[in-house]
Image (cartoon, rainbow, N blue to C red):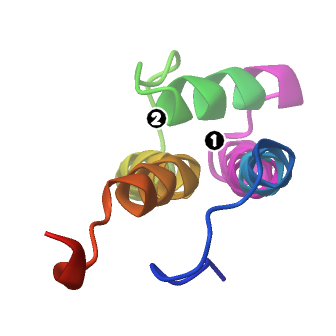
Amino acid sequence: MYEHSHQTPLTPRQFAWRFTRHVAASQAVVAVSLGAGMLGYEHFEGLAWRDAFLNAAMLLGGMGPVDAPHSPNGKLFAGFYALYAGLVFLIVTGILLAPLVHRIMHHMHVDEGTE
């Protein structure tokens, strides 16, 4: 997916396109996760879609749920969704940082024979 250390770095325009694809991928992960959270809150807690959106978005954003779950299944869902939301945060961070870190590492690479 990325160029090898012996290849020339991407042009700024190519890098911007690569970064745009990574942003789109991270947005897709967040959108799917938000949708799954909304469905879970609607199904297990019987929340209206606006309230389900708020709870799922707050968990994905790291703030915690607004409405405390009341049913046993709702409590299980909220707990597992909170754990999942933490993983989504790490995954999205990795997706967004990967091209930046690769570009920095690529520019810092020094061939062993040129010391």
- SS for tag 1? helix
**Residue pictured at 68% horizontal, 53% vertical:** 33
Q: Amino acid at mark 1?
A: Glu
Judge by depth and name the residue closer to the eye, 86 or 8. 8
Q: Which residue is mark 1?
A: 45
The reply to whether residue 57 is in sight is yes
- Residue contact at pointers 1 and 2, CB within 8 angstroms: yes
Q: Which quadrant holds residue 94?
A: bottom left
Residue 110 percent coordinates (x, y): 27, 67
Judge by depth and name the residue closer to the eye, 22 or 50. 22
Q: Which residue is mark 2?
A: 70
Image position of 53 with respect to 110: above or below: above
Q: Residues within 10 Å of mark 2 (few under 14, many from 20)?
A: few
Q: Is residue 48 magenta?
A: yes
Q: How many marks?
A: 2
Residue 15 percent coordinates (x, y): 74, 51
Q: Give the residues in magenta.
A: 24-51
Q: For this view, does 76 lie left or right of residue 47?
A: left
Q: Amino acid at mark 2?
A: His
Image position of 59 with respect to 4: above or below: above
Considering every residue shown, the one lying at the far left of the view is: 115
Residue 83 image label: none
CA distance separating discs 1 and 2: 7 Å
Residue 24 percent coordinates (x, y): 82, 50
Residue 77 percent coordinates (x, y): 48, 56
Judge by depth and name the residue closer to the eye, 34 or 89. 89
Magenta region, main secondary structure:
helix
